[in-house]
Amino acid sequence: MLLILMIFQACGESEIGQYPLDGDAPGPVSNIFVDNQKGAAVISYDIPNDDDLLYVKAVYKLDNGQEVQQKTSAYANSIRVEGLGQSKEQTIQLYTGDRSKNESKPISVVIHPADAPIYDVFSSLKINNDFGGIRLEWDNPTKSDVVLTILKADGGNELVEVDHFYTNTKVGKGNVRGYAAEEQMFAVYVRDRWQNHSDTLIASYLPLHEVRLDKSKFTKWNPPGIPYQDLANQGWTIQKLWDNSKENPGFSMPTSARIPNDFTFDLGQWATLSRFKIYHRASSAQLYTGANIKRFEVWGSEHNNVNEDFNTWVKLGEYESKKPSGLPLGQVSEEDMDYAFIKGEDFQVESSPRVRYLRFMVHETWGGTSYVQIMEVDFYGDIK
């Protein structure tokens, strides 16, 4: 009796979750409608009345000849094919499949998508001379994921990649830096994740003169109404911002500080600023959390006749620190570490008068603290 019971139980268990197998292919989709889009097409349809229908599949080719497949659930009534490049008419195949691993005969569907978003980005591209290199601006109206690749002619006139920008913002901009103020040949093209490429724009540009400001001239300074807040008794002083060390201690306000708060210092030289770098505190418990600066403003003045009234200052820009990985609070990647600590986070000064005195107004830290910590800063521009 025990043996019979065990056999009966095993048979019952083997049937749980199993679907009956058959050799009958499902019917095809019907009532097909095509919505052509930029680099893609959405195909709507009615699904067949098959109880074990599992999916609908589209088979098509990318511009490079690679065959790809897209699948969608039997509960959906549309499927999106994407990754297509330049606008052209092409035929794709639609299949249905069931739980018995049967597939229907294909239905041919003609689509004619518009040019992929990379071509809109490329046609909007503007490149101008800028401090230490070139400045790029572009529009991306569909907010598509694209990559702008920048190349430069080497000594033998061969184009070599020197930088790239990953972007999905509607309006984008970027800078390529570190080049002498002499005529340079640059080239730019746009691509997407399916390796569709735009044409390549090639031209000569003349970078504007840019130097890193001499930090030995920076000094502690504050005007009336803006008192100093630091942890001098623990070595976390304002002077640590420019001591050429990214190690502890850096600059820190006391934990009793309150957001928003501000701090000031003297560059010790007059300059038209082009950009600056902030090096974040980078221990595993601090990077992109804790008191690291996140959202802030920078103000400047050519003279020291200023005070807490913002009308006595000139705004140089509003800024927000970015986290490349996009990981949740408390999680960081090697890319995050490289961006925020090794290389330093770069911030563009859109328009700067000649300034010497700076004021940072901090509105938010990455960890939501009421105080601020920064390990080091660099400033760049023209001091002529």
Image: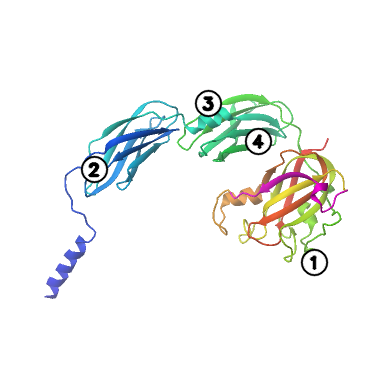
**Mark in the foreground, 2 or 1:** 2
Residue wearing tag 2: 48
| Image point (51%, 32%), residue name | 118
Residue wearing tag 1: 233
User: Amino acid under label 1?
Assistant: Asn
- Look at the numbered discs 3 and 1 and tell me whether their residues touch, using CB distance below 8 Å: no
**Mark in the foreground, 2 or 3:** 2
How packed is label 2: few (under 14 Cα within 10 Å), some, or many (20 or more)?
some
Q: Is residue 357 magenta?
A: no
Residue wearing tag 3: 199
The first of marks 4 and 2 along the sequence is 2
Residue wearing tag 4: 176
Distance, label 2 to label 3, CA atoms, is 44 Å
Distance, label 4 to label 2, CA atoms, is 55 Å
Distance, label 2 to label 1, CA atoms, is 76 Å
Q: Is 242 left, or right, of 85 in this rendering?
A: right
Looking at the image, residue 25 lies above or below residue 186? below
How packed is label 3: few (under 14 Cα within 10 Å), some, or many (20 or more)?
few
The total number of labels drawn is 4
The first of marks 3 and 1 along the sequence is 3
| Image point (80%, 55%), residue name | 239
* Color theme of the render: rainbow
Q: Is 291 left, or right, of 125 in this rendering?
A: right
Q: Position of residue 52 (x, y in %)?
A: 22, 49
Distance, label 3 to label 1, CA atoms, is 59 Å
How packed is label 1: few (under 14 Cα within 10 Å), some, or many (20 or more)?
few
| Image point (52%, 39%), residue name | 143
Q: Which residues are magenta?
A: 305-323
User: Amino acid under label 2?
Assistant: Pro
